[in-house]
Every structure is written in structure tokens, then in C-alpha cells.
Amino acid sequence: MTVEDSIGSLLATLGSALESATTAFPDGEEQFLPPAEGVSLLDIKNDLLLSYLQNLVFLVIIKLRNADSRAETSCDIKADVVKKLVELRVYLERGVRPLESKLKYQIDKVVRAAEEDDRRNTQKSRGDKDSKKKAATKTLNQDGDVWGESDSDPRGAGEEYLNGPVEGDMSVGPRPAALLRNTDTTTLKKDSSTKSRSTATTSGAYKPPRITPTAMPEPPSTKDREVPARKRRSQLLDEYVDEELSTAPRAQPSIGSNSTIIKHGRGAMSSRDREKERERIEYEERNFTRLPAESKAERRKARLRGERERRDMFGGEDWTGLGGLGDRINRSVTGKSRGEKANVLERREKRRRETQDGPRDDGSGGINIRIGESFEKRRRIMQQKAEKKARRKG
């Protein structure tokens, strides 16, 4: 099937569709005019959409007829049609749609009122037919007046007036009948509750209220202590698996850099701490801001939390799961036992400062420290203490 045959069949189908559409239209011109009491926004929307579709079909026809020709006239017509399509699209997108979203509530109320009016008219026509059938079933009352079935209950008619649809502009406004219904339901609920209370009091048996059982909140410290040690994974083993058993490339900090040494050279940052520090630096560089430093209280809380959660820490590494080795080393090195005022490291540094010899004296009487000067100083101090003790005894 060639291109010319396909174009001809397409034009034939379009012509048949247009003919069927024109036959479906009504004959009177008044049917095409918008109603006098309609919504102008919806009329404008329909007109814009119809003109947009017409221009779109016109553009398709131009492309089909001038598929092979490149004349200036066809290009100008095509440009004008495209410009008109863009203009109509802007009207629909920027003009009609925002107004329709703002007036959605009012439009829905008006459309609902129109539907209620049509439904009321149909029910009225059906009621006229039913009234003719029921005319033979009317009865006489004691005074001889004639009552129909609809007039048997005036109260029902009033309730129907309150609850039923209201004609005119009130259909768009508030409905006071809804408030009456709410008050009726609340009074019924109150009556039922008072009746239930009266029956409970007359029975004489006290029924306590049902309360859902809830667990009391516990401090986080007790929860952390209750966590068994076997559930805590060893950070040292995780780092060993990631570094030694993994073939992925990894970045290591330079040896001796200030970013890896903490506690004045007595500790080193673990891989987890280095990862947190890297994330902090990346966030600050990406957002051009500086995060606030931790206060003393926050550092104290973090240290206590770390001692509680990761007790087996030594040298910046986690020794959890290795039989408490890190905990024993940490207590033996930094712990204060047997009532000592300083830990092992502080006492060792003090001894080294006291017993360390300075450079040798060259005999010139300079400022160099002489051999045995610290010993003489300690000897004089001990001698003074012994003299004071002897004077107190004497």
C-alpha cells in the first residue's frame, strides 16, 4: 500500500466522520448559543478547546497537502497556525486552568443545583401522573374535609422542607438543616449515655473503665545494659573484613597526620570516626557552612555513651568480642586503682621528668643542667622533712 493510497483513505475516513458529526447536530441555531444563565468560564473553555482542535486539524491538513513542496506561502501559513496554537494553549494553561481551580467549589455547587433542579422537575412530572391515579383513593375526615396522602403528616412535610433541597440561591449557600440533624444525633447519644449510666448505678456493681495496658518507659541506660554482649558486633573484626578480605580500593590517611591522632598521641581515630569526620567535611564544603563544635557537655555525654555501648576500647579501636582484652588493657593503663591519685601513664611521665639527666656540663659555668642536680634537690627535701619530724618529737 503506497503513501498516496494511505493519504486518500485517511481523507475519506475524515470526510465520513465529519458528515456523521454534522448530521448529529441539531437544526436550530439556538442550540449552539450558550445559555443565558450559564457559567461564562466554562463557555470560554469550550470555545478555546474547540478552536484549538480546529487549528490542530488544519495544521495536519497543511502537512498532508504540502508534504513534498517547500513554498514560502505554505511555510508562512504553517507558522501562523503554529503561532495560533501556541496562543490558544497559553490561554488554556495560564488563563482558564488557574481560574477553574479557584472557582471549583462554586462551579460544583452551581452544577449540583442545576442537576437537583432537573431531578426535581422529573419527580414533579411523575408525581402529577401518580396523583391522577391516587385521586380515587382519597378519604373524608370527620369534618368532611378532603386529605391526601401527602397532607396526612404536616410535621413530615416540615422535615422534608428542612432536609430536602432548597430552591433558588439557597442551594448554593449553607444548609441549616444539617445543623439540626447534628443536634438531634447528639441529643440521642446523650440520652443513651445517661440511660446506660443509670442502669449501671441501679445494678450496684462497679465496673471499672477499660484501659489499654501500656508499658512504662524505661531510661535508655537500663536498656543498653540489658543488651547482651554477643549481640554487639566487633568493630575490629568488621574493619579487618573490609580492609583485608575485600578487593575494593580504599583510601588511607597519611601516617602522622593530625586528623588521625587524638588524645595527645595516646590514641588514634578508628575507621568509623574517620568516616564521620569525612561526612562532616563534605557537608560543610557542599553547603558552604560551618557546623558548630561540640560543647563540653555533649562531649561528656558522647564519652559516657561510648563507654557504655563500647566498653572494650583501647587505642582508638574496638576490641569487643575478644574476651574483654581491650577493657582489661584500658583499666590497667588508664584506670585508677588502690586509691592512687594518678593513673599509670601520668605517674610514669612524672618519674621520667624527675630522673631524666640533662646535657653534660662543659665546665664553662653555663646554664646546662649538672649531673645529679635532681638527686641533690630530692635529698635536700627529704632532709628538711626529717628535721621537721625530729623537732615535732622533741
Image: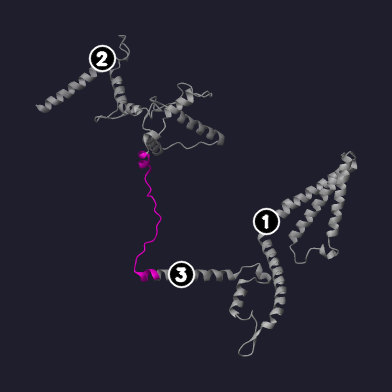
**Mark 2 secondary-structure assignment:** loop
Can you tell which of label 1 and label 3 is closer to the viewer?
3
Q: Which mark is residue 192?
A: 3
**Mark 1 secondary-structure assignment:** helix
Question: Where does label 1 land, which residue?
Answer: 101
Can you tell which of label 2 and label 3 is closer to the viewer?
3
Residue 218 position in % (x across, y down):
37, 46
**Vertical arrangement, residue 348 with respect to residue 299, above or below:** above
Q: Residue at x 43, y 29 (%)?
A: 235
Task: Bin the neighbour count of mark 2 within 10 Å (Cα to Cα): few under 14, some 14-19, many 20 and up.
Answer: few
Question: Where does label 2 land, which residue?
Answer: 372
Instruction: Name the quadrant of the C terminus.
Output: top left
Asked whether, in this view, residue 139 is left or right of residue 183, the answer is right
User: For the magenta stretch, what is the residue range?
Assistant: 199-226
Q: Quadrant of residue 158?
A: bottom right
Marks 1 and 2 sit apart, C-alpha to C-alpha, by 97 Å
**Mark 3 secondary-structure assignment:** helix
Instruction: Name the quadrant of the N terminus.
Output: top right
Residue 119 position in % (x across, y down):
70, 68
Marks 1 and 3 sit apart, C-alpha to C-alpha, by 45 Å
- Answer with mark 1 or mark 3, whichever residue precedes in sequence: 1
Task: Bin the neighbour count of mark 3 within 10 Å (Cα to Cα): few under 14, some 14-19, many 20 and up.
Answer: few
Q: Amino acid at mark 2?
A: Gly
Whether residue 80 is visible here, answered yes or no, is no
